[in-house]
Amino acid sequence: MSAQPEDAAPSDREYVITREYDAPRELVWLACTQSNHVAQWWGPRGFSAPACQWDAQPGNIIHVVMRGPNGMEYPMGGQFHEVNPPEKLVTTTGPLDARGHLMFEFRHTLTLQENNGKTTLTMRSRLMKVTDPDSARFINGFEAGMTQSLERLASVLDAMPFSIEQFLNAPVDRVWRAVTTPVEMSRWFFDMNHFKPEIGAEFDFTVKHEGHTYEHLCRVTALIPRQKIAYSWRYNGHKGDSLVTFELFAEGTGTRLKLTHEGLETFPKTPHFERRNFVRGWTWLIGASLPDFVEKADREIFVMREFNAPRELTWEAMTNPKHVVNWWGPRGFSTTIEVMDFRVGGEWRHVMQGPDGVKYPNHSVFLEIEKPERIVFRHDGHRESGSSVDFVSTWTFEELEADKTRVSIRLVFPSAAERDRIAKEFGAIEGARQTLERMGEYMALMD
């Protein structure tokens, strides 16, 4: 933090105070614009704010009563001038005398900039006018008071619940199934085989991350079908207890989902439990993984299979053409690989031949490669002298144990109608299942 008073006349004095917070900008904005949060940090150390009228809308009045450690109260008035979430807030404030008149007035311009999950707050405060000649001691104490206020803001941020909202282009019933059905939760969230959407139901699940294993212990605490579900969230062997809440709101034919995670400050003060890790995790789950699942569910084909083989072996079997040629395709099919340039942007051209002799030329381009976890490629193919097939294929390789791997195939088609056509005309669902069966049979023979 820095505070720099500029050399100026007493009625034109300016201070610039900066502070970096380990919190996303949206959260800092809420802490600076919602009265229940502002009341917890406004004022120097030891002060409280028993009254806080702080509705951040242009033209609205500000009224805050600060109470010092000795019980003396200091009323403050002001007004909101510019509210541009989550970047900029412009206000004027000043202390009030016994008659309710401003003794002096500062114009504050608060700006927020985010970088890698952290937020830099800059408070530029310019003294605009002085109406009480005896207010010099209050003006001289402004720098220390505002500096201490912004220091207190850091502890408020640590205790604030994390919240994220996401609009989903899917009806409420569809989203509700995604957040309460174990088989669907495993697709975008975590494996929760013991999960039941019933108040009092207890469940657990394990997550492996960066060489560490985290056993989650949870209990459903609230349930309103199609509207809300909440459950406790803690970690076996670690202190702390928190609460996760999903809320669903219908908006036209879509759904707005709000996720709130309270109690993050109760977890151990170690790098693994830093708030930023929760923010990143939930932002990806709610902002990317869940929308990708619910908004494409009606135009996808999904199959998976577990293999008694290490993940590295399954990855090798899928990415090395000398292995792929031995198992690719449904039973009775053979494959000739013309080129398999396994890199992002690389081409994969191969020809499959069915038991009836019909050939299926195929062309793919690799879009994403995350060894040894995920492969994404765009596929174009057709039956010789027949109809074509176009989809995006995602293969994921999940390590369940040292010698056990779950491989899943997800094919996303341009439309639900196209998905149904391919499933019927090409037998794509059964074909994908047989392909994974052949993969497993071949791996059993690999060294």
Image (cartoon, rainbow, N blue to C red):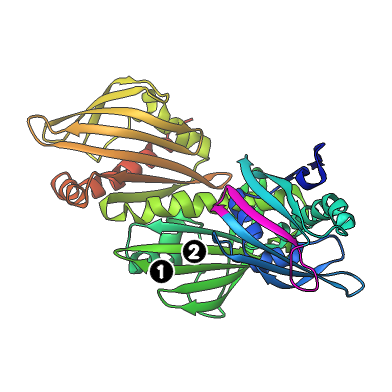
Using the rendered view, name the quadrant where residue 40 is placed. Answer: bottom right
Q: Nearer the viewer, residue 315 or 283?
A: 283
Specify whether 353 is left or right of 190. Answer: left
The earlier-in-sequence mark between 2 and 1 is 1
331 relative to 21 in the view: left or right: left
* Residue type (three-letter) at the residue carrying disc 1: Phe
Packing grade of label 1 (10 A; few <14, some 14-19, many >=20) is some
* 109 up-or-down from 103: above or below: above
- Residue holding disc 2: 258
The answer to if 69 sits in the magenta stretch is no
Residue at 84%, 66% (x, y): give it: 47
Place of residue 387 in the rendered image (x, y in percent of width and height, measured from the top left):
11, 36
Residue 383: x %, y % from top left: 13, 33
Q: Which residues are magenta?
A: 82-102
Which residue type carries mark 2? Lys
Residue 48 seen in the figure: yes
- Percent position of residue 88, x then y: 59, 48
Q: Spatial distance from mark 2 to mark 1, Cα to Cα?
A: 8 Å
Marks 2 & 1, CB-CB < 8 Å contact: yes
Q: Residue at x 11, y 29 (%)?
A: 384
SS of the residue at dot 2? Answer: strand
Q: Which residue sits at x=26%, y=25%?
A: 350
**425 or 165, which lies in front?**
165
Residue underneath mark 1: 249
Magenta residue check for 99? yes
Residue 18: quadrant of the picture? top right
